[in-house]
Image: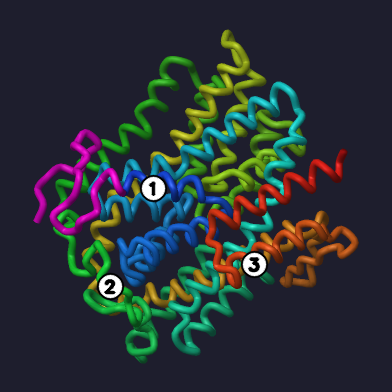
Amino acid sequence: MSTQAPVPHEKPPSATPSHTVSFGEALKVWVRVALLSFGGPAGQIAVMHRILVEEKRWISESRFLHALNYCMLLPGPEAQQLAIYIGWLLHRTWGGVVAGTLFILPGFVAILALSYLYAGYKGLSSVDALFYGLAPAVLAIVVQAVLRIGSRALRNRTMVAIAAAAFLAIFFFEVPFPLIILCAALTGLIGGRLRPQTFAVIPAHGATLGPQAGDPAISDQSVPHTAPTFGRAVRIVMVFGLLWMGPLLAFLLMLGRGNVYVEEGLFFSKAAVVTFGGAYAVLAYMAQQAVDVYGWLAPGEMLDGLGMAETTPGPLIQVVQFVGFMGAFRDPGALHPMLAGTLAAVWTTWVTFVPCFLWIFLGAPYIEHLRGNRLLAAALSGITAAVVGVILNLAIWFALHTLFAVVDERQAGALRLLVPQWRTLDVAALVIAFGSFLSLFVWKQGMVRTLAGSVLVGFGYYMLARA
């Protein structure tokens, strides 16, 4: 059992005794993952799965899904938390800090640059042209994620039925995501007792999900530094709790309750705790508070910020950075508006994402310790199947809003229908999406070439069409 204190001042290791992946090699891969993390959680999970499980073979399929299912239960961006989890498995606390920070860094820089343009110039046509071809390509990547994860997780009719039920519940009836996950977990627990073989999708130690192309770098047996201890848990709560709440308390004492930085810190700290089910679950509430209560945004500006977050790498919840920027830009006090906005962008990002590190570093050792528990494995198998249905929901939602300019929402009792207006079909986006599917599934060109080709084609078409 490891006795080393897992706190942020520990030195980054070049390798750990349990595997041969160096810290430098992992750093390069985490940069690559961060730069390719487009398309919301489905696309981001697909990127990590493809690189870490299939290409690098650093982690097994079963361990990847086990970690993913825990992250799906937490508030906050599940894809970023999955990166923290796997980084921690590889290189302890520093590995998780680096993986989680790099995951949001490209998106932070991109949205900050776009916020400058938005606040200062309000002219984003060239940026729109640059990202025009990106969304259709991401659509193909998300569909690929559904097929890849589904082919491994839906191993019998029961798992298929759970995935279908989850999709119907969230897509047509808007059942809250946490409730879907809870029902899937209970189904797995009950099924694990009655029909244990049917619910063995997430295996216990040493088991696999079928043929594996060589042993993963992280053994499916216990990794020494993942053993949970009470002392470690106390240190994690103290260190990351202080990093999260310490600056907020200092701002409150120095600046007072009505200061924009204090208000943003309190609001987004609360949002970080209640964002179960991903960013979409809290966006409506966030937009209403930012516009009507605090006056940080003008009506309609939340959609502009959401567009920035959807077309840049990183978690969709990164839109909080734009909200914080505009709030301080409009209430800069003695500071220059751009400087005030920049500081607010850093601040809102800090209070939104520091809790993610706390949830993972505190809970992951216990989740790892319980991997051999067959009932827990059955519950997570049920969650895995439900996650496939949720990702399919995201894929269809993303497809509708990528290919159609107008998508109507109609209610028939408890039933919610998304009906696209066919006259608003973007034929060019459809062609680019079809080309991306061919590139990935037929020509096997890979993700980077597919994204690059789609962006170039989209940029050229957008500029010519509006010339």
Q: Which residue is mark 1?
A: 30
Range covered by the magenta-colored residues: 1-25
The residue at the point 50 percent across, 69 percent down is 387
Nearer-N-terminus badge (3/1): 1
Q: Is residue 252 visible?
A: yes
Q: Looking at the picture, which amino acid does disc 1 mark?
A: Trp
Of the 4 image quadrants, the one containing the C terminus is top right
Q: CA distance from mark 3 to mark 1?
A: 25 Å
Residue 22 inside the magenta-drawn segment: yes
| Circle 2: element type | loop
From the viewer's perspective, tell me whether residue 453 is left or right of residue 417. Answer: left
The answer for how far apart the CA atoms under marks 2 and 3 are is 29 Å
Nearer mark to the viewer, of 3 and 1: 3
Q: Is residue 52 above or below residue 3?
A: below
Residue 9: percent from left, percent from top: 21, 33
Answer whether residue 73 is visible to the viewer in this image. no
Quarter occupied by the N terminus: bottom left
Residue drawn at (54%, 54%), measured in percent from left and top? 448
Picture coordinates of residue 202, whole percent (x, y) = 35, 76
Determine the CA span between mark 1 and mark 2: 22 Å
Q: Earlier in the sequence, mark 1 or mark 2?
A: 1
Q: Are marks 3 and 1 in contact (CB under 8 Å)?
A: no
Element type where label 3 sits in the image:
helix
- Disc 2: which residue: 214
Say whether residue 324 is magenta: no
Q: Amino acid at mark 2?
A: Gly
